[in-house]
Amino acid sequence: MADQSTPEARTTAVPEPREGTTAPADREGISRRRLLGTAGATGVVLGAAGGAVGYAAAASAEVTPLTSVGEDRAMFHGKHQPGITDGLPARGHLIAFDLAPGAGRKEAAALLRRWSDTARRLMAGEPSANGDTGVAQDAGPSSLTLTFGFGHSFFARTGLEKQRPVALDPLPDFSSDHLDKARSNGDLWVQIGAHDALVAFHALRAVQKDAGSAARVRWQMNGFNRSPGATARPMTARNLMGQIDGTRNPKPSESDFDQRIFVPANSDPAWMAHGSYVVVRRIRMLLDDWEKLAVKEQEAVVGRRKSDGAPLSGGTETTEMDLEKTDSAGNPVVPVNAHARITRPDQNGGAAMLRRPLSYHDGMDADGVPDAGLLFVCWQADPLRGFVPVQRKLDRGDALTPFLRHEASGLFAVPGGAAEGGYVGQLLLEG
């Protein structure tokens, strides 16, 4: 919920490609994906018995291309893993695994090799190698990303304790925590995001199938954001409280972005070079209580106008907040306990996080209260200099805290991207 949070959502019908993304290369003739897209548009059925007929009909008809949303593709191989600097996905899944009893370093390496191959294939719009379900066979990549990380417990289970980073030490306890241990932490963590729900689900099933007997699911959480093209203009996303959330998120164009978000090339341990650390928190929003407040009361809690995200000190959403401005009675225009004031980097020794969260709604609880809120996902080069100081400050007197409940938590080391022909975590597992 920090004000320095969410990357700007891609909400135009034709999203601008990020660095490292590209549309799939045109194949000679008609690709499988374009063929299936045409079949869906024209009513041609491609089955085991009618495949040849369907192909002939599609080949002679005008090919209907994928929309820009389906065509957009993120690259799996690179300096950093995908799913960190990409725009917010319309649909996402977070899932943690524990290694199965008896599984160790060898099994973990084989699993990461399978996962990396599956991620490479699916992000290119191709079927997985391990019994593809066909759920998304008529879709393009849809900006699919898969990201993999290691939890604190992974290193003891694989005999790699000496390679465990100091930055992966457990997070401190916070007074606002009401954590469910069964839905926290884990040996392995996977983040899946896409602009199409079926594409995201397809990747989720593939990851689960690839785990086989090597690992079992510890917990899974599902979330969403606004779909590309759902608004008339690009804008910072709103959370389920209705507030614009993410105005001060660090941007890749800033000179110190890499220094704040990514582990340097000369890191210790070396296998974390170009990686990052991710904090994952399931934050339930007490929406019934929040919605009882008048808009002006909500704005005082946050420190920004609800209508456009501008600071209460005046201006537009991106105007620098004036923390010294007072009203006619001499009171700060932006209250001293306002969320946006407390989370500012200049109020926390420069601490900054790149947030890429998801909203969630898991129905109603036994009392008929919405079980909804934020799957908080934030990235930083060191959580002790990013997440921890900000959360400690919030813990001491954030006006938003009474309307939130932190129900699950996890910290994971996310290594750099896989080289061509390699897999995520290879330097750790084979080094």
Image (cartoon, rainbow, N blue to C red):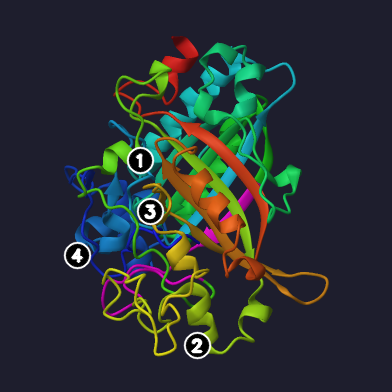
**Residue 382: x and y, percent?**
44, 35
Marks 1 and 3 sit apart, C-alpha to C-alpha, by 14 Å
Marks 2 and 3 sit apart, C-alpha to C-alpha, by 25 Å
The disc, 4 or 2, on the residue closer to the chain's N-terminal end is: 4
- Please identify, in this view, whether the residue under mark 1 or under mark 4 is nearer the observer: 1
Marks 4 and 2 sit apart, C-alpha to C-alpha, by 55 Å
Q: Indicate which disc residue 62 carries.
A: 4
* Quadrant for the C terminus in the image: top left
Amino acid type assigned to the residue bearing label 4 in the image: Glu
Say whether residue 135 is visible: no
- Please identify, in this view, whether the residue under mark 2 or under mark 1 is nearer the observer: 2
Q: Which residue lies furthest to the top in this view?
A: 431
Determine which residue is flagged by label 3. Answer: 345
Determine which residue is flagged by label 1. Answer: 261
The relative height of residue 104 versus residue 120 in the rendered view (above or below) is above
Marks 1 and 4 sit apart, C-alpha to C-alpha, by 46 Å
- Circle 2 SS class: helix
Q: Which range is magenta?
A: 220-239
